[in-house]
Image (spheres, coloured by chain):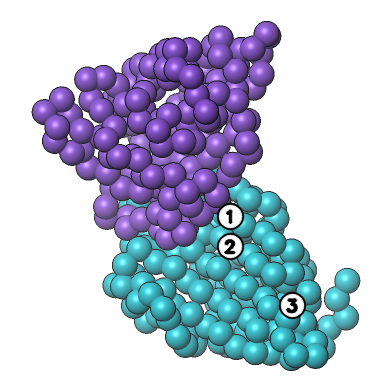
Chain colours: A purple, B cyan
Amino acid sequence: MTAKDDRDLVLERVVDVPPELLFMAWTTPQHLMPWFCPKPYRTVECEIDLKPGGRFFAQMVDPGGNKLPAEAGCYLEIVPNRRLVWTSALGPGYRPRDPQSAPWFFTAVLTFEPEGDGGCRYTATAIHATREHADAHDRMGFSQGWAMVLNQLVEYVRTTPMT
Amino acid sequence: MTAKDDRDLVLERVVDVPPELLFMAWTTPQHLMPWFCPKPYRTVECEIDLKPGGRFFAQMVDPGGNKLPAEAGCYLEIVPNRRLVWTSALGPGYRPRDPQSAPWFFTAVLTFEPEGDGGCRYTATAIHATREHADAHDRMGFSQGWAMVLNQLVEYVRTTPMT
């Protein structure tokens, strides 16, 4: 984990699957749900409207099947196979979230850079308003959680024929 | 004023200046500052980085020269001469604003449609999280303020050689 700005959390890793498949797994509900949250939690519902202003929604459940709180986020930038940006500070159609609905928001910037022969330099950055919010997100499990789901993601991409 | 969603405030008007000049006045600091806030308030500083994720900042002062509170917003969509979207819920680089820094945020969607011979159907929509936030924004002066500055904007475009 490295960060240039102490309000950001960064996970960067070189993995041996190509940008195209990682991007597809991040942007197709059927290919996102299998790996998107740390097992034994599961993602049971996912909606993706892949355009700036479009909806990103994922419903997670705990091992007992109880739904975790979930709000739709909003896509901001989409560069096929290379970059994906969305935020929890806006809902679909760029509608702001109620400031009273959450202690903090974050914007996620994912980049997928080709590396070596069929690999990818994968970088996930979570951007916050303050250092305190970044710390709170990290205590909530960013570092561990996002690293775990990256392992699940790479394993999924390696073992699943994706179309 | 019309609204399809009661969380939105809408100002729609047909004006006799073309979309291209209105868009230029909205996106060039030297052409924005003269009309951007209701006189006798003034805009004394303006920064525009016209790209998704770019900074939009305008510093207003009251008639006594005292600065009003100001935070940089973030551009979300730019379609030259037709559409401009920015939000107060994010700062430059899509960094979320601190929820505790404001009672509500809004996203502004401006559209400029050619109408008749050199005219424009101008629509400004302010999108909020809740009806209460829209009402608060309206009480703060959206309807009156945005209509006043549209008059100032049209007058400016009519009377100023713009390059």
Look at mark 2 in the image and give the residue it sits on. Answer: B85
The residue sitting at 62% across, 57% down in the picture is B77
Three-letter code for the amino acid on which mark 3 is drawn: Pro
For the residues labelled 2 and 1, say whether their Cβ atoms are less than 8 Å apart.
Answer: yes
Residue beneath disc 1: B76
Instruction: Tell which circle, 2 or 3, labels the residue nearer the N-terminal end.
Output: 3
Looking at the image, which is closer to me, A114 or A9? A114
Report the chain holding disc 1: B
Q: Between marks 3 and 1, how big is the CA–CA gap? A: 19 Å
| Residue found at x 49% / y 36% | A27
Q: Residues within 10 Å of mark 1 (few under 14, many from 20)?
A: many
Q: Secondary structure at mark 1?
A: strand
Which residue was labeled with disc 3?
B19
Chain to which the residue tagged by mark 2 belongs: B
Residue A56 image position (x, y, % from top left): 41, 45
Give the crowd class for mark 2: few <14, some 14-19, many >=20 residues within 10 Å. Answer: many
Residue at 68%, 78% (x, y): give it. B113
Looking at the rendered image, the quarter that the C terminus of chain B falls into is bottom right
* Place of residue B5 in the rendered image (x, y in percent of width and height, measured from the top left): 38, 75
The answer to whether residue A160 of the structure is visible from this angle is yes
Asked which secondary structure carries label 3, the reply is helix
Give left or right: position of B102 versus A109. Answer: left
Query: A16 or A95: which is nearer to us?
Result: A16
Image position of B101 (left or right of A25) = left
Whether residue B98 can be seen here: no
